[in-house]
Image (cartoon, rainbow, N blue to C red):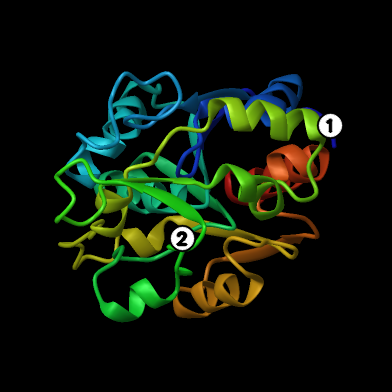
Amino acid sequence: MGEVPATRHFVLVHGICHGAWCWYKIASLLKNSGVKVTAVDLGGAGINPGNADSILSFEEYNKPLIDLIPTIPEDEKIILVGHSAGGLSLTHATHVFGKRKISVCIYITAAMLRNGFMTDEDVQFIPDIADVVDFNFGLGPDQPPTSAIFKPELQRNLLYKCSPEEDFTLASMLLRPGPLMVLLGAKFEGDNSGKVDKVNRVYIKTAKDEVLKLENQELLIKKWPPNEVMSIDTDHSPFFSKPNELHKLLLKASTMYCG
């Protein structure tokens, strides 16, 4: 593949229950390719000190990403990479910064919704996870659940079916409840200028996904078509199961849209 200019800066954004730790293979591969890499912990994730049951807005959850982007020098081209629910974080960032700061967004089997969950139709694109997670009720038992974590006995087959045993073991030790309430409440309004649509987007499908099924991924792509669609024949966690293949696709996408 050859070296990529170091002016490219990949910012890696995890999905629900995960943290920056899930990118350890991809971050290593990208750094060895000569690019800059930052993996971020969102609110209440990874080693972030927040608590998912105390986070009451999507903006608060996504603040670590929104605070990071302005600190990246102007001469570095930002490639945002989001996995699963991390797609909402990418779209929120494009609403805030537009093409002025972001060269391309890469959605990996992710929630790619132009305005977040604005309508009932938007919610229908995302599978019902009620049967596969344990809920926490931070606002009280008579209120909607504030956070959720995948049931331990289902994590292997749902998230890491094609992944090495060691990575599943690592993940099972590090997963934290994710702020379900604020994710489902993510709504991005106010972009009448179309600046969000001007940011290049690439979608990477995962063909053997048991969380966001392939048909759901294709519905998301059809609703808000990206510039490019790529595919990996693996589970919901290609950063574990197919890191070399994912690394090549990330470099390819950055080459296509970073000049």
Say few, some or many: other residues with alpha carbon within 10 Å of mark 1 (under 14 / 14 to 19 / 20 or more): few
Q: Position of residue 52 (x, y in %)?
A: 29, 35
Instruction: Say which mark, if any, is on residue 2.
Output: 1
Q: Position of residue 53 (x, y in %)?
A: 24, 37
* Residue 88 shown left or right of residue 23 in the figure: left
Residue 7 can be seen, yes or no: no
State the CA–CA distance, disc 1 to disc 2.
Answer: 31 Å
Q: Earlier in the sequence, mark 1 or mark 2?
A: 1
Residue 180 can be seen, yes or no: yes
Q: Nearer the viewer, residue 23 or 193?
A: 23
Q: How many marks?
A: 2
Q: Nearer the viewer, residue 127 or 201?
A: 127
Say few, some or many: other residues with alpha carbon within 10 Å of mark 2 (under 14 / 14 to 19 / 20 or more): many
The residue that appears at 65% across and 71% down in the rendered structure is 214
Instruction: Tell me the quarter of the image containing the N terminus.
Output: top right
The residue that appears at 44% across and 74% down in the rendered structure is 125
Q: Position of residue 248 (x, y in %)?
A: 78, 43
Residue 185 occupies quadrant: bottom left
Q: Secondary structure at mark 1?
A: loop
Q: Nearer the viewer, residue 174 or 15?
A: 174
Position of 241 relative to 123 (above/below): above
Residue to which mark 2 is pinned: 111
- Three-letter amino acid code of the residue under disc 1: Gly
The residue that appears at 65% across and 54% down in the rendered structure is 158
Position of 201 relative to 6 (above/below): below
